[in-house]
Amino acid sequence: MKFTFGIVILLLINFSLSMSQVAGVSGADTKELLQMEMDNQLGADGMSQLDGMPVGNSIDPKFYYIGPGDILSLQIFPIQNTPRNLTVSPDYTVLLPRIGEVDLKNKTLEQVRDTINKLYQSRSASSKAFVNLKEARKCIVNIKGNVLSPAIYTLPSSYQVSTAISFANQLGKLSGVPIVAVEAMVQVQEKQREADRLFSETGIPSKPIYWSRNITLLRKDGTSQQIDLEKAVITNDINNDPYVKEGDQIVVPFDQQYFNQISISGAVTRPIILPFKSNDKVSMLLKFGFGTTDDADTNNVYCFLPSSNRRIQLKIDKSLNLLSEDFEIEPGTTVIIGQKLSYMRSNFGTVSVKGFVKSPGNYLIKIGETRLKDIIEMAGGFDNEAYLPLGRIIRRDYKQQSLSDPRQETFETMQYSDLKMDDTVRYYIDMKYKQPLVSTDFYEVFEKNSEIHNVLLYDGDVIEVPSNPGKVRVFGQVKNPGFVEFQPGKSMDWYVERAGGYAEGSERHRARIIRGRTQVWLEGSDSVAVFAGDQIYVPRVPDEPTTVKLQRYAVLASIVATVSVLINALAVIFIRK
């Protein structure tokens, strides 16, 4: 206790000495400021864990209006080194130390800073007050119309209208919405994403956008404002995307099928169709494209005016800044940015040869000419341990799967199929585990000289030539399942006999050979050879529930009884004749 009291006394002495050196501060002022400093220490320590910096958009002091609930941070140099928190009261006032009550109604943050600084400088010319927005107040905002979750939200006043709309479009905000409705919304988003994918890199927008230039903001004081978010972005004008206030209503319009349109397309970052607004100029339409792509031809840019059927050539730079004379556009105006030839298809490619060839590695091929035999010859031919029946070619699949639903390709392919319900499960499995293999057979090419299987190679192909595994796996309903030593030219039955023969409960006619290269199942007749690396599977008789057996017996008994009755009836008829 004594130690703590001593520290406090030292702090008081040190603070008094420092205050005595500040010009324009009397002894009475020093005592008052000392009390302020101690209050500050206690208050600031208690609130430091609770107060955070503003969330939402960055604050522009010229346009952010202070309101009830805002927490300001006040620091006065050199008489107050520790910031003090000031909360704006419901009547738009704050209580300033040594100053008293100050009205902040209808003042921006910049005006508040200037007002408070002048008040303190009027007391002491050498002092300077700094005011920051410590925490933005919360506002009740009603967001209506074309958003995922129209509702009344409590949002920070640091949010601009665009941020508030984005907040209402989050799927995570759909609390209380039925799962079916959420799934429907996800499907709509996925459909739009797929449309964007199909139109990507074409220079043509996938759909018109109506709502972003036609938002209505209704203020609590009865005023209203049309919000143009597209214009706000390119002009950096906050008047077109203001901060929200208490009691605001944001009405986002639904998309319209017919409206006056303007568009920019071609080699731009964002090809887009937007609503026409009066006083729109061609310089603004250019900016809506968000810059050019790398292959843009800036010497081939034209603006089309439909009413006069005029085509005007424009001079622009890579940032879509207009270098020629600006002019107002009209409904239906479109700007097209020309494109240079940017994609040069190479006549050559690279393939990789792996495994048991004399010189494995990467080789240059000529697209449309180099075949399997040619590349094996480049690699010096096969090694003595190479086993051709297991050789394969792996090819890159350039089709991108949907990130949100990997089954999309399956559903698209199946959409117009005539598959029966029993076929669909097998089809799903085949689609899920299909392999990127080229349809060929090394054994047919190099042993039987088949030109059908001597396939053309493509850039990125990988040719794998494994060694002879020397074994065949036999499993299922056999007496001694396991690996059997490979013997060339032997049939499936020969390998089953080496595995102890068919076990009790096996179904011989359903036994299959599973090829090691493709995993395809084949019937094992004497004319079908088994290769090393293959597997032989012998299934058992399917298990059948007792109820199914009883039902079958009942059906058979019913048939027998029906036939018996029919025979008796016919016998009676013949006897009477």
Image (cartoon, rainbow, N blue to C red):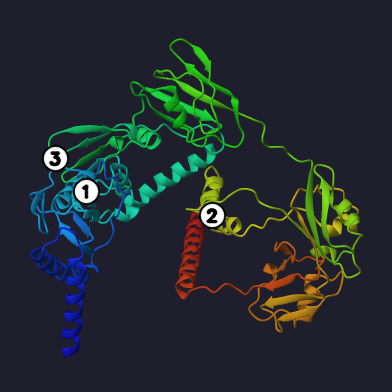
Does residue 406 appear to the left or right of 331 in the view shown? right
Alpha carbon of mark 1 to alpha carbon of mark 2: how far? 70 Å
* Kind of residue sitting beneath label 2: Thr
Could you say which quadrant of the image residue 379 lies in? bottom right
Q: Residues within 10 Å of mark 2 (few under 14, many from 20)?
A: few
Q: Is residue 38 above or below residue 156?
A: below
Across and down, in percent, residue 40 comes to: 17, 67
Residue located beneath label 2 in the image: 424
Residue located beneath label 3 in the image: 220
Does residue 528 appear to the left or right of 109 in the view shown? right
Q: Is residue 528 visible?
A: no
- Who's the residue at 44% across and 72% down the image? 547
- Who's the residue at 12% across and 37% down the image? 221
Q: Earlier in the sequence, mark 1 or mark 2?
A: 1
Residue located beneath label 1 in the image: 113
Contact, mark 1 vs mark 2 (Cβ under 8 Å):
no
Across and down, in percent, residue 494 comes to: 81, 75
Task: State which quarter of the image contains the N terminus.
Answer: bottom left
* Kind of residue sitting beneath label 1: Arg
Picture mark count: 3
